[in-house]
Image (cartoon, coloured by chain):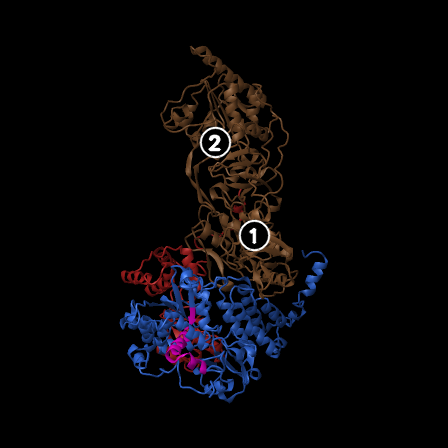
Amino acid sequence: MSGLDTIPPVLLARLGKADPRALDGYVADGGYASWKKVLAGAKTGEWTPAKLTDMVKASGLRGRGGAGFPCGLKWTFVPAKDKRGDKPVYLLCNADESEPGTFKDRLLIEQDPHQILEGMMLASFALEVKHAYVYIRGEMVHGAEILNAAVAEAHAKGFLGTDILGSGVDLTITIHRGAGAYICGEETALIESLEGKRGHPRIKPPFPAVSGVWGSPTVVNNVETLCCVKHIVDRGADWFKGVGRNEKNTGPKLYAVSGHVEKPGVYEAPIGIPWEQLLAMAGGVRGGRKLKAVIPGGSSAPILTAAEIAGIPMDFDGIAAAKSMFGSAAIIVMDETTDIPKAVTNIAKFYAHESCGQCTPCREGTPWLLKMLRRIVNGEGKKTDLDLLLQISNQMGNGMTICVFADAAIAPVISGITKFRGEFEAYIEKSKNKTFDQEAPGDLTNAIANRQAAGIHS
Amino acid sequence: MAKVTVDGREVEVPASANALEACRAAGVDVPHFCYHPALSIVGQCRMCMVEVEGVPKIQASCTVPVRDGMVIKANTEKALAARNATMEFLLINHPLDCPICDQAGECKLQDNAVAGGLPVSRTSEPRRQFPGYDRTEIGPHVIADMTRCIQCTRCIRFCEEIAETSELTFIERGGHTIVWTHEGKPLDNDLSACAADVCPVGALTTKEFRFRKRVWWLDKTRSICDGCEIGCSLSIEHRDGVVYRYTPRVQPAVNDYWLCDYGRFRAEDLNARDFTRPEIRVAGGAAQRRQTNWGEALDAVKVAIEKAKEASAAGASGAGRGISSNVLVIGSANLTTEEAWLLATLCKDSLKVNAPEFAVDEGPRRRIRNKKDGWLYGTEAAPNSRGCEAAGLSRAKEGGASPLSLLLSKKSSSFPSVSVLYVADAHFSEKCDDPAFVAELRKASVLIVHARKRNALTDAADIVLPVASLAGVEGTFVNAKGRVQRVDLAILAPPIVRTNLEIFLHLGARYGACDTQWTARDVFDRMKASVPGYAGLDWDADAVVGNPPSISPAAAYDALGLNKDADVEVFTRPSVAAPDRKP
Amino acid sequence: MSGGANVPVAEQAGNPRAGEHGALSCGKPLSFSRETRAELDRLLTRYPTKQAALLPALWLAQREWGWISREAVDHVASLLDLSSAFVWGVVTFYTMYNRAPVGKHLIQVCTSISCHLNGAEEVFHECKKRLGGLETGETSKDGKYTVIEVECLAQCDKAPAVMVNDDDYAVITKDNLDAFLKGLG
């Protein structure tokens, strides 16, 4: 038996049920059994927060939001009770799904909200949280309504509130809607936004686990991650570990496939299935065309060529080995008709629009990249542009900014130009603006050296 | 404390410091924009990039807390490349308008570009503009130009954290981000012009100073604000005898980096002058005064005083104890302590009249903030009531029994009809413009005043002795906290104008009481033993001059970059020596 | 002696910036209805600070008045003990708070990568054209339509995706665009 064998849907098991959002149906399908089990065990001492955390650690669950950080380990960063004083711990469910190409969390929210709530309940138990928040992106108006209704129903049925089911455990969940800002998916920006501010990512340290929302220890987990927690408690850490390619990439995974495929959609499969298998699930490349490139983890992942992605296991380490990023498992497929310079320009437009504007390199760099790329695809490129684009990109990332947004913004530009340079050059060849060729090259090395030699540079 | 090595130099800094502060303590200059010692850390300009040993990624030094044994490399190739990158990003949209920008010469962007910027521009894209957001008054004193803004948020943090009024905010996001007020809520608070002070570029400038003088032409002289008794340290910035502006001078114990708008914009008043020569009304009651020389004027003062004393001695039975109440002297809390002491001493030992009185207006409440004490409040409209009292002037109070007290208590016609009333100076109270108040003082046969500007009292006076403004005096003030703080001579008053001190010296010399060559420092040294609060002080002591504590890197550190920060000019050059002038 | 007098300083009133980055006035002071106020009070119990209720409070304001005016900002700021400038800073950071009245149907066309690969830009431009040549963000004369371009709506499997007010619409192409617009009414 292999961890990659096809399994019946777990996260999407209740898809297609009549009224999948109703609590009764959820309970009838075995929902809230784990929550009841843990609450009952809490009284007898059979279930403790530490036990639940250990279980999640043992499962090998890695965060499904993008970074792939081990979930159980993240939980252990919260200071112990005696160290955090009387500060409460907060759990924030990150439902600010905004990465272009990603739409898996929306499906879970709209189709099975109680699954998310149960995951949050269990995580809250493990973290001794009394008030948890769902930060849902502003555009998901109906998603927020669905979650609010689910919370109200869970309250009414006694799964939330004070002294839940006589266990002595208290828990409230509040649904908080954003208002349109991609950056609020970054956990510290999310925290700032929840506090009622502009969503500017914070300087780390301190990390949220120590000082997050309202200065309290805070854990931010993705929607799908929390759903996985529920299934881990349902079925055990060993089961979870048994699914997936290897022990570093475990569990069932939702793949959001979009772009040029026959059947775009969310597909559940053991994490680490080969690329070809996933593409087949999505019906293959649209219209029988040839595959050109794939963005394997949302728009911030470097583009992979058809050759590069062939045979790659679709998980964190498999894609990292191909020098891209698994991210949120948003797979954007591009067929042979795709105009890569235009696609890269489109992604650059997204990042220029969404930069929060606090760090200089990102605030100034993202619009600069966009202006240059737009010029190129509008037929006004010049020969030095491509090298300059790469140089600018390289001086935006790698610690130059507070958060990794800039790194995300440059990945498609660097990979696009490096891997499909010919297409960019073709645009420049046809450039209307011949005079641009005459300008000095973008390389500053000599200019700086000359200046230093002249004693001008201090 | 933590031991940190910066570019091979070991330095000890408090454990709460960050890597940028450690670099500064070690004397390694790391350029920065958003960092300001008095504001919270945001780490967003990304200018202060350095390498920290053991940390793979480049770090914004202001965001890195120090730890013992940390090794910082501020000038590696990687660090310089990172800082060059940030400079390039800042400059791609910054207008190349230094020649017409009022910040030029004190612009951090300009300084950093000259010190280590890139020699060429690689961008050919159109520069960002913010039509409608340039050259706009966003408050009574501040003009904003967003095309020049580098989004460092110092001004926003200033309004939130120091002024506590939050009028400024980031609007929009990404490359469109600007700093602005909310419509209908201008930048108008007690300290609003400090927002322009903290602005490292020409995005916020003060309306009053804009385009008046290139800053590199300005001389700066240490002084103390005379707007109230808080006594904020400031520098008078002047050129060719004209005062152009005040800027705050760092003083952690009083005003930190700040200056209130009320105090700051008193600077312009120093240029106002109505009296340039002594004036005297000829005996016999001509309607007009005529201009005269100091010899005649001071001789006339002495003659009037002596005549009055003789008259009272002759008229009063049993007189002869030597103290005449026929001569009344009113001082002022605008006097330096040296001037007040000299006046009090002359009255007691030479003129042999009652000790001078003085009164202070209770002005509107002024306030300033520092890190340690929070808000400091001032209510008096003069800087030195404490020094004057210590020097022997007696403070008139409503409800008191002294002549000035009775007058202040609005007991009309209570003021005595003395022969000589000597007022130094005529600006001691706003009431000196009140006809009823002046009429009481005018009951004296001879009215002598020190003055710079005209008011109802000077109009009524028989002898007007022209005096220098704050910019033209040397001496010390005692502030509300009892700190003795020195005022330096910024610009010489016009040729025939004297300081109060010089006038007292020359009057005293006519009694053989003092030498006209004495400087404020000489008086300071003579009086310090007898004036409370001055014992043991030295004219050049750092505390008196207002220098932050001098430096061993660790000790200086408590003032956290205060003495090293170029955000506000700190003085190292000696004070301008008073030129030798004889009345 | 002030040199400032030589500078052509824009007048505060009538400055063209109002409405571009600044808050437009609705012409009268605003305050929440009793019901909305009660809803805000309920919301405030969900957070340890008043400030945290800012985004929800702005949503309530938008629901009540359709857009966020200068006066709405002032009202929300006073309710939450914040400065108006701070609130406006927050409003302008997020894209979903309307800073001017919008049409009955706010048509939000996604043009991010997955939709782009499926021809979203064309749909966006066609949409504006077919509604009488509207500019981006302009409201049609009958007050019915406003068309804007938005970033990823997390409906990449239904590209090109469109959101109208709060409702999601899947696979809007050049071909079914007319039917879609007609369906809005």
Instruction: Name above or below for residue A1 compared with residue B168.
Output: below
- Chain rendered red: C
Q: Residue at x 53, y 22 (%)?
A: B280
Stretch in magenta = A220-242
Viewer-side residue, B347 vs A100: B347
Instruction: Kindly identify which chain the residue marked by label 1 belongs to.
Output: B
Q: Where residue B302 is drawn, which disc sits there? A: none
Identity of the residue drawn at 62% across and 44% down = B217
What shade does chain B have? brown
Can residue C62 be seen in the rendering of this structure?
Answer: yes
Q: Is residue A324 left or right of residue A128?
A: right
Please check whether the numbered discs 1 and 2 fall on a single chain.
Answer: yes
Task: Assign a secondary structure to mark 1.
Answer: strand
Three-letter code for the amino acid on which mark 1 is drawn: Val
Does the magenta run of residues contain A221? yes
SS at badge 2: loop
Could you classify mark 2 by the number of other residues whose Cα lies within 10 Å: few (under 14), some (14-19), or many (20 or more)? Answer: many
Indicate whether A295 appears above or below B203.
below
Q: Which residue is mark 2?
A: B333
Q: Chain of mark 2?
A: B
The residue pinned by badge 1 equals B13
- Indicate the amino acid at tag 2: Ala
Measure the C-alpha gap from mark 1 to mark 2: 42 Å
> Measured from the top left, where is residue B214 in percent x and y?
60, 46
